[in-house]
Structure formats: structure tokens, C-alpha cells
């Protein structure tokens, strides 16, 4: 075939990564092995029934046609209302653009702020698609590691040290995937001050905001930040709608208006009946409190079950759907630890190094399993840690 564009081949570099552990665990489970899957962040429960019924009603009512490029008006209004709650800043519909999932909101934010050759800073540990999204924009980026010893809280001085003359944006994620860290107001104020002084965009991925209790702070609410912050959001985690592909981007009205042109040449709008189901879910908070309570409860169950486990330290893990465990005292190579745990105890986890060097020596535990499964996994982890130490000795 003719040669593909270098843009496509450059999105993801070649080489192995820790996702191999997840894929191996999934393959073995599908083959019949009793593998406990704690490696993927997808709910183990279905979308709330009310949302499903709203979708069925919309389909039967004839809503199967093209929609407005930035989203149907009622959907944007509902998203604006949620953005007001999420960020603490009064938001109107013209400051919101609907996207097919949070990933497209991230893609739009990067495309809208960076030209080819521009530079951005990505705070790590980070969600796996971040580097490829910048490469798709043909932008340069530097990864700044938030230290495990700081609870994965980012330091403004470390970001400042990575600035270049062509730096245009900083990307953060709070509550964080993979660490579960919820960035403090102090951490965010330091980053906000940096963005203001150097005239930078702040791209803030806040898709887990409902899973942080009362601790979530959006940098958009900080003084002088609404004009330079783009907030990435999604209904996947908050409303139990991972496969529905509904997200949105909140930002200055002028930028949101420009990004409508991006929808023109990418998505050409959203699916009508899905949009109307999303409206119902947003306006009525279908599943939101129940989902938040579920994950807050599961986090406590798992952390209580491993409390006192020698040589394993909990890092971050205040919000979101994940717990991050520091296993360096047992095995410095997190990928080796993950493979051994899969083989010995039939538990699939993600090696922390899959999410950047800052999480090396850690494993990420997904809380997307019922309490009894998490308790079983905790007991297996205790047994494995003790056995692994004995063999090492």
C-alpha cells in the first residue's frame, strides 16, 4: 500500500508497555482461568435504568437525525449546569462544547491550543492517551513527574523548571488516574500562578470529579483562571456511561466557538438519541450519588483490608476509581511484580510505570469489582507479598 502519514505512525511510539499484563490477564480470563481483573477502569455495573429508558424513548420518538455541531441546545445547557457545580464558576451553554467522550474533549483542547512545534507540559503520572494526543497535534511535550513521596501532588517549581520559550499549555488530571490523588488547593494555586505569569493555557482533566467527595477543587475557579482554563469532562465515570461516548469541554466562549469548526471536520455532531438520554441523566443526576458512594465504599473496604501490610505503602488514593500501591520495598520492578502476581494469585493489575516514571515501582488497583472480590484480592495480595519476600530472602 502507499506510505501512511508520519503523523499516524508517530502517535504511539513502538515498544512494549505495562498494558501487556492487562491483555494477558484478559486473555487468560476469557480462556476460563479464574482471574480477578483489577487492571481496567470500566464499571462492573450497567448504566442506570432511567438513562437506558430515556434512550429507548428517544429512539422510538424519531430522534435519529443530524444534530447541531456543538451539541443540541438542551444538552449544552445541562452540561453547563454540571460545569457550574464541577468548577464552581457560573457557566453558560456557549462555554461548553459536547464531544463523543472525554478523549475527544482532550483532543479538542490540545488541537485548540497548540500548533505544530509548540511545547506543552504533562504532569505525571498521567492517563495513557496523553502523550499520543500531543503527538497527534505534532506538538512537543515534557513530562514532569509528581513524586510518590509527596502523595503525587504536583509541584509548581518542577513545572516551572520545564518551561521553554514555546511552551503554550500545561495538562493536569485531578482526581488523578492512575494514582487516585486529589490535587490540593495549594498545589493548584501554584500551577495557576505559573500559568498566569507565563500566559499559558491550563488543560484540566476532571472526569473523576464526582468521585472525590467534597475535596475536588477545579483550577477554573481560581482567580483569573477561567479565561485560560479548559476543563475536560465526561459522563463515563460520573453517570456510569463509559460506552455511550458523551463528554464535553468547558472554557472561554471564544475558544469554544472556534472548536465548533473542529467538530465539523471530525465528529459532525453527536448521536441524537444518545444526546437526549444524556440530557435526562444530567438533569436528574441518574446514578451519580450511588456511583460515588459505591467507589468511596470500595476504596475504604480495600484499604482497610490491606492496612498493616508490611512493605506495601498506599500513595495518593483519595479519589477516583483506583488505589496506588508502592511495592518497591518488595520488588523495585513493578512490571515484574505484576506478572508474578498474575501467575501466583490470578490477579491482573496495571504496573505503575505504564503511566510514567513517577509511578514506577507501584501497581494500580482498579476498584471496579464488588466488595467481596476486592476482599479476596486483598487477601491474595497479602499472601503473595509474604511469599515473595520469603523467596527473595
Image (cartoon, grey):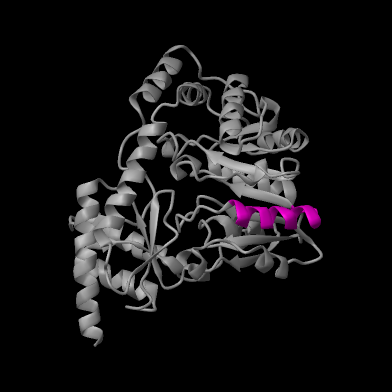
Q: Is residue 97 visible?
A: yes
The segment highlighted magenta reads 185-200
Quadrant showing the N terminus: bottom right
Q: Position of residue 253 (x, y in %)?
A: 74, 33
Instruction: Please tell me which residue is depicted at 25% across the width and 53% down the height of the picture.
Output: 374
Residue 199 is a magenta residue: yes
Q: Looking at the picture, does residue 77 appear above or below residue 244? A: above
Instruction: Please tell me which residue is depicted at 56% across the width and 36% down the height of the picture.
Output: 86
Most common SS among magenta residues: helix
Q: Is residue 9 visible?
A: no
Question: Residue 27 or 389: which is nearer the viewer?
Answer: 389
Q: Position of residue 167 (x, y in %)?
A: 76, 61
Q: Position of residue 321 (x, y in %)?
A: 40, 49
Q: Looking at the picture, does residue 207 appear above or below residue 323? A: above
Picture quadrant of residue 312: bottom left
Residue 256 is a magenta residue: no
Instruction: Please tell me which residue is depicted at 55% across the width and 45% down the height of the picture.
Output: 103
Picture quadrant of residue 21: bottom left
Instruction: Please tell me which residue is depicted at 28% across the width and 62% down the height of the picture.
Output: 307
Amino acid at each position: 500500500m502507499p506510505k501512511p502519514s508520519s503523523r499516524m505512525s508517530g502517535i504511539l511510539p513502538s515498544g512494549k508497555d505495562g498494558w501487556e499484563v492487562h491483555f494477558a490477564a484478559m486473555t487468560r480470563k476469557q480462556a476460563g482461568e479464574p482471574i480477578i481483573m483489577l487492571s481496567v477502569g470500566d464499571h462492573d455495573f450497567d448504566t442506570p435504568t432511567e438513562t437506558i429508558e430515556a434512550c429507548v424513548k428517544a429512539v422510538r420518538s424519531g430522534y435519529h437525525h443530524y444534530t447541531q455541531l456543538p451539541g443540541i441546545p438542551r444538552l449544552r445547557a445541562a452540561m453547563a449546569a454540571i460545569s457550574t457545580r464541577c468548577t464552581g464558576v457560573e457557566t453558560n451553554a456557549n462555554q461548553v462544547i459536547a464531544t463523543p467522550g472525554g478523549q475527544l474533549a482532550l483532543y479538542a483542547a490540545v488541537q485548540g491550543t497548540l500548533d505544530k512545534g509548540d511545547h506543552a507540559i504533562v504532569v505525571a503520572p498521567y492517563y495513557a492517551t496523553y502523550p499520543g494526543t500531543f503527538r497527534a497535534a505534532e506538538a512537543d511535550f515534557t513530562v514532569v513527574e509528581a513524586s510518590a513521596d509527596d502523595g503525587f501532588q504536583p509541584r509548581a517549581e518542577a513545572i516551572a523548571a520545564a518551561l521553554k520559550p514555546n511552551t503554550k499549555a500545561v495538562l493536569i488530571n485531578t482526581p488523578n488516574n492512575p494514582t487516585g490523588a486529589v490535587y490540593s488547593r495549594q498545589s493548584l494555586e501554584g500551577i495557576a500562578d505559573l500559568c498566569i505569569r507565563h500566559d499559558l493555557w491550563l488543560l484540566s482533566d476532571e472526569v473523576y470529579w464526582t468521585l472525590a467527595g467534597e475535596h475536588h477543587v477545579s483550577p477554573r475557579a481560581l482567580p483569573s483562571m477561567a479565561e485560560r482554563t479548559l476543563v475536560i469532562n465526561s459522563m463515563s465515570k460520573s453517570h456510569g456511561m463509559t460506552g455511550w461516548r458523551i463528554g464535553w469541554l468547558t472554557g472561554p466562549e471564544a475558544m469554544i466557538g472556534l472548536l465548533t469548526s473542529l467538530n465539523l471536520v471530525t465528529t459532525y455532531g453527536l448521536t441524537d438519541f444518545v444526546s437526549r438520554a444524556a440530557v435526562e441523566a444530567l438533569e436528574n443526576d441518574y446514578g451519580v450519588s450511588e456511583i460515588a458512594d459505591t467507589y468511596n465504599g470500595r476504596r475504604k473496604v480495600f484499604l482497610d483490608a490491606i492496612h498493616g501490610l508490611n512493605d506495601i505503602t498506599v500513595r495518593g488514593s483519595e479519589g477516583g476509581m483506583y488505589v496506588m500501591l508502592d511495592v518497591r520495598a518488595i520488588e523495585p520492578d513493578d512490571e515484574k511484580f505484576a506478572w508474578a502476581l498474575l501467575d501466583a494469585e490470578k490477579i491482573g493489575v496495571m504496573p505503575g510505570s505504564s503511566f510514567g516514571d513517577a509511578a514506577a515501582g507501584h501497581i494500580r488497583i482498579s476498584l471496579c469489582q464488588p466488595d467481596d472480590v476486592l476482599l479476596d484480592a486483598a487477601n491474595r495480595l497479602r499472601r503473595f507479598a509474604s511469599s515473595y519476600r520469603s523467596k527473595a530472602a
